[in-house]
Image (cartoon, coloured by chain):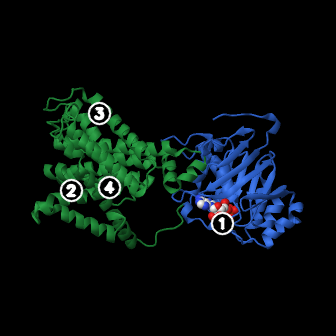
Chain colours: A blue, B green
Amino acid sequence: MPINHDHKTANALEIQGVGRRFGGFWAVKDVSLSVRPGERRAVLGPNGAGKTTLFNVLTGDLAASAGTIRMDGADVTQTPMHKRIKGGLRRTYQHAHLFDGLTVRETLFLAVSSVAGGWQRFMPLKPSDGAIGKAESLAQMSGLCSDLGREVANLSHGQRRQLEIGMALAENPKMLLLDEPAAGLSPSERPRLAELLLSLPKDITIVLIEHDMDIALRTSDSVSVLHNGRLLAEGSPENIMSNEAVHDVYMGGAHGH
Amino acid sequence: MKSALFLLPFALVPFFANDFWLVQIFGRALILGIIALSLTFLAAYLGVVSFAQATMAGVAGYTVAYFGPNTVDVGREMPFFVVLPLAMIMATLSGAIIGLIARRSQGIYAIMITLAIGVAFFYFTRQNYNYFNGWTGFSGIRAPEIAGTSLREPLPFYLLIILVSALCLLFVNGFIKSPLGLTIQAVRDAPKRVLAIGIPTTPVIVSAYAFAGFIAGSGGILNVWYQERISSFSVGLGPIVDILVIAVIGGLKNPIGAFIGALAFVLLDTFAVDFIDRERFNTLIGLVLLAIIMGAPDGLHGLAKSWLSRFKKRPSENQV
Ligand SMILES: Nc1ncnc2c1ncn2[C@@H]1O[C@H](COP(=O)(O)OP(=O)(O)O)[C@@H](O)[C@H]1O
Ligand SMILES: [Mg+2]
């Protein structure tokens, strides 16, 4: 892959004219935005606006149909997903998408050793393995330390969301893409999630899709609003809250799609 | 560790069984069990049903036949300590190649592609005389003599079979707890998520098939010593289906199922002739298979497990 390092525009994320088409339908169309290193960016928009599709294109889950994606100045538009992950990108999925047959410890172990190296080993795992220790501290961070030995299939919905985040935090991510991490959490679990997000190291760049306005606005410096696959508005949380177009989309014709 | 204890009853067989029971029943069951184990491994941990396991075993068998003592004019004899590792390497390699071809296929497509590979290999062995001696294949294959002990003697041969069976079970159970083994199970559960934590899935799938080839190869070597011959029919549709039937009857969820299924299969295969015509055996095994699929989808192993848990009190739930 060609790495074109451009020092003037070394934004954590810089995308230009990005689009994704399903058949004749552009789920994401001509989106350009840039996110500074360490910035906390919320992505808002009604259901079907193209938020998840945008994430899929950013991570490489889906190929972009148009545009270019740069991370830390390097063009990663054609880079396969696992290499983008090695470069420090992590994501969570809106619909938790986990290894149901493994335990929490094994899942977090894989999240660590996939980036740090060592997943290829075929000798039985020792409890003293360094990556196991890291997995256990990830469990601690995501509030799962009493569930380390449980099979993922037996976790509650909230715990699955916590595990998603724990996996994404493995091995010092540079940029986190969180897709509705609060979805399906009970009102009592939400503040804890907000705390967790606020407690993350400040040098991690976070892009957060969130319907819970309280969490989204509390944890972010800036907001981008998507509508019908296009970027509708961008600005500080205060700006966005008072933006009329945004209000129209959320209050008025939000059910258009 | 615990699961190898399951083979303990097999280890006691020499104390009361005659040579017929020792080799033709228990020995043969364990050999078929090892080959079926390679299928059960792929089914349980990669989530793929492979029809190419008799093929991988056959690759090891043909290697032993070609480079070992035989009574046909094909091949080149080499010492057994060269031939055995070579046979294992060839079987493992065949597994890796089949995995590379089938890597994107799941469910019915994996079945079709592995079946196609198996059938292609069958026709290839029939038509190739330089390496496979066509449809007649190899006969007069003899197990070697190691340190003064002939492996053609029933007891040493049986002890070798049970040792290899136990090792294969231990390998499988150790491997699935290794980082690579865990990754294989992760690919079974959510392949896209494996990419999303930074692991390319192709090497994972290929190594699962290669490991299955290694296991099938160990069974294939023992099988060619047991049969003392190998031909295209040893890798044809019959053995391919037998291995699948054994794995399904035993249960695809647990490695032990392969051995339970193999013992049931060999007992039926050997003694059903006493009650029904030879030609009706396929009907009988078909009915047994149907009954298992309808009544006990997790096979005899699953059936035994649920019976056992009914006898026990409530199983403790706080095992972590
Ligand atoms: N794989 C797909 N194939 C076809 N259409 C899709 C696919 N994924 C998403 N879409 C469509 O793209 C639009 C945007 O979806 P999505 O990105 O999930 O929206 P959001 O996350 O903002 O709710 C929707 O209309 C959805 O139906
Ligand atoms: Mg979405």
Q: CA distance from mark 4 to mark 2?
A: 12 Å
**Which element carries disc 1, helix, strand or loop?**
helix
Say what amino acid the circle numbered 4 marks. Ala
Say what amino acid the circle numbered 3 marks. Leu
Q: Are marks 2 and 3 in contact (CB under 8 Å)?
A: no
Q: CA distance from mark 4 to mark 1?
A: 38 Å
Disc 2 target residue: B266
Disc 3 target residue: B84
The numbered mark, 2 or 3, whose residue comes first in the sequence reads 3
Q: Quadrant of ligand 1?
A: bottom right
Q: Residues within 10 Å of mark 2 (few under 14, many from 20)?
A: many
Q: Are marks 3 and 1 in contact (CB under 8 Å)?
A: no
Say what amino acid the circle numbered 2 marks. Val
| Subunit bearing disc 1 | A
Q: CA distance from mark 2 to mark 3?
A: 26 Å
| Subunit bearing disc 2 | B
Disc 1 target residue: A158
User: For the point 34% across and 66% down, which residue is it?
Assistant: B304
| Subunit bearing disc 3 | B
Q: Are marks 4 and 3 in contact (CB under 8 Å)?
A: no
- Toward which corner of the image does residue B313 lie, by quadrant? bottom left
Q: Residues within 10 Å of mark 3 (few under 14, many from 20)?
A: many
Front in this rendered view, residue A183 or A10: A10
Image location (x, y in percent) of residue B217? 31, 41
In-image side of B88 versus B234 (left or right)? right
The numbered mark, 4 or 3, whose residue comes first in the sequence reads 3
In-image side of A174 versus B287 (left or right)? right
Asked if badges 2 and 3 are on one and the same chain, I answer: yes
Q: Residues within 10 Å of mark 1 (few under 14, many from 20)?
A: some
**Which element carries disc 2, helix, strand or loop?**
helix
Disc 4 target residue: B258
Say what amino acid the circle numbered 1 marks. Gly
